[in-house]
Every structure is written in C-alpha cells, then in structure tokens.
Amino acid sequence: MNSMDGKLERLFTMARPGIDPPRREAPPWFARRVVRLWLSANAESASQTSWRRVTRCGLGLAGAAMVASLALNWRVWWHADSPEQLASESVVWLALPK
C-alpha cells in the first residue's frame, strides 16, 4: 500500500497549479523507429481498402442507374420533337378553347 500512496502523492503534486511536470524527451532512436514502421507499413490499410471498395461499388451502381435511365427513355430521346414544332404546338394548345 505504501507504493500506491507514493504514486498518488506524486500525482497530486504534479496536479497542483504552478508546478510543471518533469519533461522527458523521447530517445533519439524512437523517431527513427516510428518513421521506419510507417514507411514499412503496407500502403493500403484496411480502412483505405474498404473506402475504395465502397466508392467503386457506388460508382458502379450510379453508372448502372444512368444506363438504365437512358435505356428506358431511349424512345423519348430518339423521337424528340424539334424545338420549333414544340413551340408551334404550345401556341396552338393555348389558342384552342378549353
């Protein structure tokens, strides 16, 4: 229990205002080791792979929806009336009594 009291006392001492905790520098080899681990890690982590999969699936579904929309509306696009004909029909429909 004595070691626990010493740890608590040290913690309370460090928590008092105006007392700076002792700063410990990282050893010089630590930064090199961390950078080496980052560089040796696989470039494609699991989160990047899953995000890429979701993006590709979404793009594929959007493309399929676009192709389906064009296929279902092909008759409208193929037999579209000219703007002049549409304008003349609208004038005729406005002039006719209802």
Image (cartoon, rainbow, N blue to C red):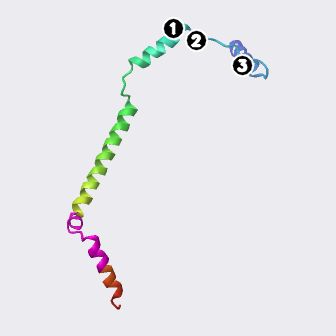
Whole-number angstrom distance, CA of label 2 to CA of label 3? 21 Å
**Camera-side mark, 1 or 3:** 1
Provide residue 80's location: percent of width, then percent of height: 24, 69
At label 2, counting other C-alpha atoms closer than 10 Å, the crowd grade (few under 14, some 14-19, many 20 or more) is few
In terms of sequence position, does the residue under pointer 1 or pointer 3 come before the other? 3
Q: Secondary structure at mark 3?
A: helix
Amino acid type for the residue under numbered disc 2: Ala
Judge whether residue 47 is colored magenta: no
Point out the stretch of residues depicted in magenta: 74-88
Q: Amino acid at mark 3?
A: Leu
Residue in the image at 25% along x and 70% along y? 82
Magenta stretch, main secondary structure, is: helix
- Give the image quarter of residue 75: bottom left
Up the image or down, 56 lies above or below 83; here it is above
Kind of residue sitting beneath label 1: Trp
**What is the CA distance from the residue labelled 2 to the residue labelled 1?**
8 Å
Going by the picture, which residue comes out furthest to the front?
A: 84
**Residue drawn at (33%, 89%) of the image:** 96
Q: Position of residue 40 (x, y in %)?
A: 39, 17
| Residue designated by label 2 | 26
The residue nearer to you, when weighing 22 against 48, is 48
* Disc 3 target residue: 11
Where residue 53 sits, quadrant-wise, is top left
Mark 1 Cα-neighbour bin, 10 Å: few <14, some 14–19, many ≥20: few
Query: Vertical placement of 59 versus 65: above or below?
Result: above
Residue 88: give x, y in percent of width and height.
Answer: 29, 79
* x then y, percent, for residue 74: 21, 63
Q: What residue did someone put label 1 on? A: 29
